[in-house]
Structure formats: structure tokens, C-alpha cells
Image (cartoon, grey):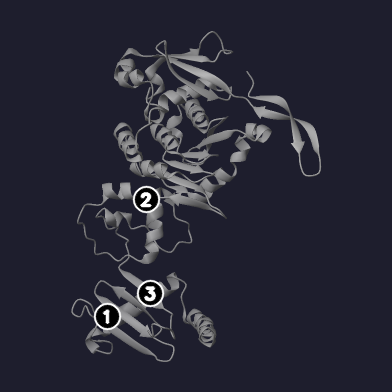
Amino acid sequence: MNTTIHHQLIHWDTAAKKEKNKNLLGEEPLSVRIQGNPYSVMMRTPGDEIPLVAGFCLTEGIIDSADDYISLAFCDGEDTNVIAVTLKPDRRNKIAKILDRRGFISQSSCGLCGKEIVEDLFQIIKPLEDDLRLDSQKALACLENIIEHQPLRQKTRAAHAAVLYSSNFEFLAAAEDVGRHNALDKVIGKLLLNRSLDQACLLILSSRISYELVQKAARARIPIIVALSRPTALAVKLASALNITLAAQADDAGCEIVLPVDSVAAQEIKAGAVNGDIVLNLDFAPTFLDFAGVAAPADMQGRSFRALLKGETPREWRTSMYYHYYEYPGAHAVKRHYGIRTKRYKLIHFYYDIDAWELYDLGEDPHELNNLYGNPAYDAVVKQLKTELERLRKQYGDSDELAQKFLHEYCLVFLIDELL
């Protein structure tokens, strides 16, 4: 059986029409028999039938590993469309219910609502551990290079692909098929048969991400899926429940990451927990990426506060924060100023049309009503805070020169708005 066949087509455009020979993707039925009984029939592209059925058996819950079956082979030679699977007796007894109903959730979901599907699969499939971090740029590069693993697509423009990489972005295996589910089963089956499936960490898909593909990835313990098209809503729900990160190619550039934050956070954060450490707005993006298993870009100034949510304060966590308020003159009428805040003190410098400093002892004066700047009793505190203030300004790349530049730009925009 051939993966492609030649067929004569008529190429028509507004100017003319002519006959052409083109490659069409092959499609044949494949019957899977388990313990001698018919189990499933799937339409597939001929080729890699043994990996296809091996992956199918794993992702459908028939086996958990290559040690669960005695044989997996064609019936009457490779030219047939039938593959027989013989399970070990203990495995056969363990999955009796699955075999009796002839299908896993993905094969028997008619009449179920999305919530029931997620709940059923959550009971059947154990959520993945969430400790993997991958470089988002490298993951996106793998997606952009998927065409390199699609020879059938290049010939026929009709095949889906699934590609697996390790945590170090080492290429592990690829597969194509007329069906996106089959392509995934094939590539999973290839690694299952050579006993290297535990190395798979990143799945690249040429299709959208449906909940069945999330289910199959979860059965194979693959924590991150990146695809050309966005996931479905149900796929996102299931991925969140199983701690799988989903991402898709963005409309313009980059990728869109769906974060499984709710499920992971629910397991890590104790109800009613309170944390008093200093957290900034710019810490949220790295935290979301951390929960998603994606490494934060080097140019991000914030840091993940995931450890704080678990009640753990890293030894090197910040003890002070820097801020700068630029919007003046403007509607809010708050003078331009920058400052530093610790858990106990707040030091502020106002500039532009004034030059003034303020110091507040937040322990004694939480509402900041009594300015202590100039009080000799706080000279040592002021000296220490100014040293830390300058360190933070350098860390974030702020300076008086930059403030002056922003001042000119902002005032020009403000003046134009007023005139209009």
C-alpha cells in the first residue's frame, strides 16, 4: 500500500484550464483486533501501522507500557489492513471494562458534556508533574520548522504532522497521517516501541489542539503542546486539569500561551494563606510563565513569585522596591516623583517644578501623614535608603537624564492634546 498515489486533476484559473498529475494522500481503513476480537477501525495513511497501533493502545488506556502486551503484529502479512494485539493476562484483566465497551472516553463521548468529559478523564489520567521549564523562543522555532518533518505534506498538501522533542530540544521522532489523531499516535508509538517515550517533553502539531489530543499527550506524559492553530475551549479545560501547557502560533508573530495556572495554583496555594513579601506588577508575567513551564525571557525585569504562593520566601528575595511616577502635568495632578519602599520605610523624591524629599515610617505611620525627612533621628535610615535607591535605579536603567527625556515627550503630547 502506498502513502501517495498519482491522479490527474484539472487546474483551472480565470485565464485557462489544463490537466496536471498530482500526488494525493493515501487513505485506507485499519482494523485493530485485541485478544482476537474487533476493537476499532480507523482511517489512516498507510505506513507506520505498528507504531500507530502501539500509540493508539497507549493513548486509549489499553496499555501503560510496552511490557503490557505479548505481541502486536499484522494479520497475514503487511499487505493486510488488520493488526492483532495480544495482551498479557494480568493486563487483560485490569482493563476488562475498557475492552467491553470498546473505546476510551475519546471514542465514546457522545451524549457527554464538556464538564463530564474533563471529570472522567481527570479520574482516569493522573495529572502531570509541573516542574519542566522550556525556552519559549526555541519551542517556537520547533513549530516554525515543522515543515521539515512533513514530506507527505509537501507532496500532497493534505497530511497532518506530529513531532516530539526532548527537554533539550533534541529531535526524537516525527509522523504524518491523514488524521491528526493518527499522526500523534504514530509518533508516540515510535518512541514507545523503542522505549524512549520518557524523553518526550515537547509536542509540535500541525493542527489545532482538540481535547482528544490533550488526552493522548497526557497518557504519554508529554507536558507541553505547541500547535499551528489555537486549542479548543474543552482542550484548555482538560489541559488545565492535567497540568499541560498549550501554545499556538500567534496571528502576527510569536506564540500564544494558554496557562494551566488555576489547576496548579489550587494544588500549591493553601486556602486563606497570606504573604507579606514585596511583589511588583512586573512579577506577574514571569510567574504566569513559571506556572506554564516556560522560561522567562532574559529581558524581563520581574521574577516569579510562585515560591511565595507556596509559603516559601527565597533567601535572595527583594526587601525593597523602586517606583517612578511620570504622569505630570496631567489629569491626576500628582507631582512627578520616584521612590523606594521597604516593609518599614518609604522614601520619596519629588522633582520637575519642585525639589523635595519625604520619608515615612510605615510601622508608626501607615497612612503617611508625618514626613520625617530632615529629622536627625532618621539620618542613618535616609542614608541607607538613598544608597539602595541608587542601586535600584541603576538596576532598572532609570536616571535623571531619562526622566528629563520623558518629561519633554510627555509635556509635548499633553500640550497637543490640550490644543486639540
User: In the visual, does 312 lie left or right of 396?
Assistant: left
Which image quadrant is residue 349 in? Answer: bottom left
**Cα–Cα span, label 3 and label 1:** 19 Å
- The residue carrying mark 1 is 381
For residue 170, above or below residue 332: above
Q: Characterize the local packing of mark 3: few (<14), some (14-19) or many (20 or more) Cα atoms within 10 angstroms.
A: some
User: In the visual, does 250 lie left or right of 390?
Assistant: right
> Mark 3–mark 1 contact, CB under 8 Å?
no
- The residue carrying mark 2 is 291
x, y (%) of residue 301? 43, 64
Q: Amino acid at mark 3?
A: Tyr
x, y (%) of residue 111? 35, 32
Name the secondary structure under disc 3.
strand
**Of labels 1 and 2, the one closer to you:** 2
For image coordinates 64% across by 33% down, the residue present is 151
Q: Amino acid at mark 2?
A: Phe
Name the secondary structure under disc 2.
helix
Q: Judge whether residue 244 can be spotted in this image.
A: no
For image coordinates 34% across by 71% down, the residue present is 321
Name the secondary structure under disc 1.
helix
State which quarter of the image contains the N terminus.
top right
Q: Amino acid at mark 1?
A: Val
Q: Earlier in the sequence, mark 3 or mark 1?
A: 3
Q: Characterize the local packing of mark 1: few (<14), some (14-19) or many (20 or more) Cα atoms within 10 angstroms.
A: some
x, y (%) of residue 320? 32, 70
Work out whether residue 360 or residue 30 is closer to the camera in this orientation and state it.
Answer: 30
- The residue carrying mark 3 is 323
State which quarter of the image contains the C terminus.
bottom right
